[in-house]
Amino acid sequence: MTYYLENSSLCLNECLNYPLSTRCNEMARLIDCGSIKDLHDFFPVLVKSIFGFPGWGLRTITRETAPMEFEYVYSFFGPLGPMFRLCYRLLSEPFKFDVPIETLPPKTIQMLNNGRYSVFYSDILNIDPYRRQVASLQLNAFDYFILHFALHGMAPLHKQFPAALTVHNDHLKTVYYFLTADFLCTFLPTDPNAEVQPSNVYCSVKSAASVTMSPIVPMRRTKYLSRNVISHNFTSNATNIRATEPSRSSYWRTESVLHLFIDTWLRYDIDGIADLPSSEFIQVVRVLVKQLHSFANSADIDVTPMASLRSLAQPMMNAQINTLILGIIQRWPLDSSFLVVLELWLSYIQPWRYTLNRHNRIEDPQMQIAIPQKFEKFIMENAASYTQIYIQLLPRFERLDFTSPKNVTILYRLARVFSQSNLTQILRMHDRRLLSEHLSLSPRKSNLFQNISSHNNHSPPSPSSPTRTSQDVTDCFDTSPNSTASTYFSQRTDVNYLHEDDTYICLFGSTERQRIIISKLEQFKNKLFESYECANQMINQLEASVQKRYNGFFGYIKWYLTNDEEAEHNQSLNDARKISEVLEFVIRSFSIIFEEELPNFLAEFTEIQQRSRENIVPNSIFEDTNMSDSLNLSHQTSPAMMMPRIRKVQYTGDPLTLPARNNEIEFLVRLFYRLSCSLNETYAVEIEQLYRRQNFVGQIARRILESPRIVQTFEKSHGSSELVERHLRPRINLRWLASYRTIIIIMLSFLVGKLLFGGPLFGFFVLILFKIIMTFLLSTYEFLFKS
């Protein structure tokens, strides 16, 4: 122990070079016994080592890929772990650490330089007296670590590390994800009676000044809210919240986490950055959104000093989240990862899912639970987050193939949320209230829906585009230097507060502008009908193929002995049935949302199919290809056109190198592949001579051996992708022995041999004999009648 006390500074620096497991253990010992001075000098170095390049692997280590490293890192950075013990030890002295403003997100820098910041930043800003601009933030150890942790999640790590790219694409949960959830749940507690642990931490460098919230008054006349809504909205926020020093010491960590996470993550400049964020960043932002809802929903039952922060959590989030969600949805590619973005939006617009007693509520998927009345205000105030994004998604979803299970899952989640019992009624009431005010809509904005469609090429939209309603809202509130109101309201982005130059499309209404939406809705509905019919046709074809498998005695024996891919066939049939059920649910929900009569699927589809046949040239492979010089995205491929092509798609590579399927044991697949390759290399000439024989022996060999074929692969070793053909000789293929069905049959043969003959091997010999006899009979049949 004395060694560490006398040489703690040297040991701390040496510890950074240890392996990760040793580093965490030794660092924990040094943190507990090192001197405060040495820890203070070493703290910025440690933080830079953790979140720098290459770092400690917080965003690359997962429990699946590195379980031991995961546990070490997770324990070290936990809310009660050594890293936070270090932060709390440094809080005993008035130490401050500088964070240059250049390291912050661009929108956060703009907020600080413009003076539009909340009282939280008033005592931590370091202003350059010559430039009269913010030079840095002076933070205590806790805030310093939390800020760097938040900034680390925004780094494009998936563009730099191949390991991170693999992890983020596979949607594995990294240490960073779990630590984010732990930090938010610890420092933003849902239960008002819960204390932030450890509870005996006191910060001596936090300002004891009271926090005053001024009444929030719009600078310009709002255009899309009735007077009673405006009065109710601003009166509820016109409260004075004061906190004394003892009360603030109990929740200052909550205040820091609330501001630092929101001002870094939700101010992500999606339009100003060329690269999209990683899917992991979208996942952790969703964790933040859910915990902010849970934290804020307990405000009405909280009597502690933390109640003031709970009442501000949702308004702070609402002021920034629209810009982020709109930008990500416009640029994110329409692949399987889009579900992560969709879930972020759906979590934000469903605050009623994140309440204190949500774990005790039994939710039946078939039962529609009404949205509590307390959340109607949230829906009305943030109606644009529901309707405008919904309108934006329709033209993008029209380009999806709804005969794919992943795409249908995306559609199902959207329909599931908007089909809740009274959600559309609340939104419809909001739109009708706007229309009842006899407000005129700007004619030059009538092409909003087409502009939204034109931005679906994943390129960043122009900031001046009228479609970016989130960017249009600025300076709606009093942001004078004398105002102490939070700047989150001054930059509020939902279109309930749009002024004369902004636009809002009523999703539910009867104005002239609704003709554009109605036209898009009809196209989308027709796409659903076509996909539903294609799914039913796929079910019929798969069920008919099952009947063909059992056509006659020899057909059954051939199917049984050749070990056809029955598991994959059943999986395809189950997927097709699920797709049909989901599409039917979506069509029913679609009719309920827009108050339409439930359609007759077959009758309407027949009419649609006749219209489509008149516009399709028969026997043309390129009937849906646009041969003009300009790119026209309006002419899209329907599911009816895509299904015949999907059925013709075949794997052209070596079948022996296919990944292990669901009905196979992975390590046995690799084992029998190596054994097959060894036999084929050793007896290549003998195998080919046996296969080429034109007698009965050759017929048996052709039944047992893998037939020769030409495989096609893409060669990328020279920097370009080139299609290369390769001829494969007749080969031995033992992969069928790795299937679960083969293993089960062999085990049953042992059991039958034990029961009937008194020895397991007798049953196995009978199975082999049966296999030889069936192969001989089928070879005789083909040699005599098909040769």
Image (cartoon, rainbow, N blue to C red):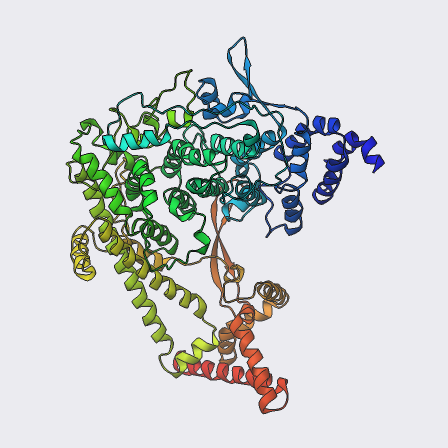
In percent of width and height, residue 558 lies at 44, 77
Q: Is residue 307 visible?
A: yes
User: Which residue occupies the foreground of this view, 212 or 385?
Assistant: 212
- The quadrant of the image that shows the N terminus is top right
Residue extending furthest toward the bottom: 757
Q: Is residue 649 above or below residue 546?
A: above
Q: Is residue 415 above or below residue 323?
A: below
* Quarter-of-image position of residue 25: top right
User: Which residue occupies the foreground of this view, 768 or 160?
Assistant: 160
In percent of width and height, residue 314 lies at 41, 36
Q: Is residue 665 above or below residue 604?
A: below
Residue visible at 28% across and 56% down in the picture: 531
Q: Is residue 693 visible?
A: no
- On the rendered structure, is 417 left or right of 563? left
- On the rendered structure, is 42 left or right of 444? right
In percent of width and height, residue 521 lies at 22, 46
